[in-house]
Amino acid sequence: MTAIATLGSHCALQVLKGAKDEGLKSILICEKKRESLYRRFNFIDELILVDSFNEILDEKCNSILEKNNAILIPHGTLISQMSSSEIESIKIPMFGNKSILRWESDRELKEKLMLEAKLNVPKSISNPKEINKLVIAKRHGAAGGKGYFLASNEKEYNKKRDRLISQGIIKGDDDLYLQEYVSGVLAYLQYFYSPLKDELEFFGVDKRHESDIEGLARIPSPEQMEMNEVPSFNVIANSPLVLRESLLSEVYSMGERFVDAAKRNVSPGMNGPFCIEGVYDADAKFHSFEFSARIVAGTNIFMEGSPYSTLLYDEPMSMGRRIAREIKNAESSNQIDKIVT
Ligand code: AMP
C-alpha cells in the first residue's frame, strides 16, 4: 500500500488527515521539538523524528520512507528550508513536479513562467535607481513575506535595505526583487490540476493576514508618521473569501493558461495543487504577483471543503484529501508515473 509523507509544518495536518480519509497510511517527518504537538492527532500513523528537516536527505530517513512506499507531498516549508538542488535530490517520489519548485523559488524564472501564461504581472524594476513610484521589495524563495518592505524612491529603498543588512536578514541588493506595488483586494486563488483527467479544478480563495502591515493599517496616520519601523508582510493566518461570480470565468482561464505554460516550459507541467496570488484593482482586473507550485497553507481553512470544492464534490473535499484521491486513482489505474516526479 502507498503511504503519504510530509514535513511537520505548514499544512501537514490537512495533508495527513486527507490521506487517512482516503484510507492511505500517513507518515510525518517531525522535528523533535514538535513531537508533542503532532502526537495529539491520531490520524498520523507514524512519526519519523529528526533534528532538522534536512535529514530527509539521509539514508536512514529515506529507507524508512522507501520501505513504506511513500510519496512525499511538498509544501512551503520544504521550499523555504531546502535549496532547489537539495529538493531535486530527494530520492522518494514527490507528488506533482519537483522541477517546477525551482521556478517558484527563483524570482526571474517565476516571472518568466507567469508571463508565458499571459498573466498580468506587475512590472519588476531591475535597478533601484529606476524607482519612481511605490514598489515592494521582496526576498527570494518562500520567505513568507518576512523582511519585505515598501519604498517610493531610491533613498528610501537604500535606508530600508541597509537596515535589513544590519539585522542579518539579507546580504545586499541581490537578495531583493523589486516589483510595482498594486493596491486593491488581495486574493490567493487555489487550484488543482489533474493530469489523470486533464482537468483543472478551482478549489478556493483565501486572503492572508500579514504582520505588521495589517497592524499598521489600524494606526491613524499622525501616529504612523512618528514611527520608524519597517513593516513586514509575515503571514500569520488566513481567512476565506468568495469572489463575485462574474470573476470566475477569468479565474479558470488564468489557471488553464498557467497549466499550459507549465506544460510547455517545465515538463511534466503543473500537476497537482498550485496557487496564483495577486490583487484585484478598482476595475476588478487581476494583477498576479506570485505563484506557488504546490499546496498553499491557505487551503487549511477548507478542511471540510470550500464553497468551490462543494460545487465539484458531494463530500467534504480538502486539498489534502484531493491529493490522496489522485494518488489512489493513479494507483488503481496503474498511472503513478503520471502524478509524481
Ligand atoms: P509574495 O511573497 O510575493 O507572496 O508577497 C508577500 C506579500 O506581499 C503578499 O501576500 C502581499 O501582501 C504583498 N505583495 C507582494 N507583491 C505585491 C504587489 N506587487 N503589490 C501589492 N502587494 C504585494
Image: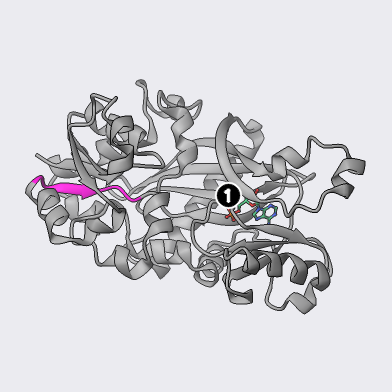
Position of residue 314 measured from the top left corner of the image (x, y, whole percent): 36, 21
Left/right placement of residue 66 relative to residue 124 reads left
User: At 82% from the left edge and 64% from the top edge, which residue is drawn?
Assistant: 152
Within 10 Å of disc 1 (Cα), the crowding (few <14, some 14-19, many 20+) is many
> Residue 72: within the magenta?
yes
Evaluate whether residue 270 shows in this view.
Answer: no
Residue for point 63% across, 69% down: 165
Front-lying residue, 111 or 74 = 74
Residue tagged 1: 277
**Which quarter shows the C terminus?**
bottom left
The residue under the point 38% across, 31% down is 318
Q: Nearer the viewer, residue 104 or 204?
A: 104
Where residue 337 appears, as percent x and y from the top left, is: 19, 56
Q: Which of 109 and 143 is in front in this view?
A: 143
Q: What residue type is labelled 1?
A: Glu
Relative to residue 120, is residue 218 drawn left or right? right
The answer to whether one can see residue 48 in this image is yes
- In the image, which residues are magenta? 68-74
- Vertical relation: 162 (above or below) 39: below
In which quadrant of the rendered view does residue 54 lie? bottom left
Give how far across and how far down residue 35 sits, in percent: 28, 36
In this picture, is 102 found above or below 210? Answer: below
Numbered marks: total: 1
Work out whether 251 lies above or below 163. Answer: above
User: Would residue 87 be found to the left or right of residue 289 on screen?
Assistant: left
Task: Residue 113: say if magenta.
Answer: no
Quarter in which the N terminus is drawn: top left
Task: Indicate yes or no: mark 1 CB to ligand 1 under 8 Å.
Answer: yes
Q: Which secondary structure lies at badge 1? A: strand
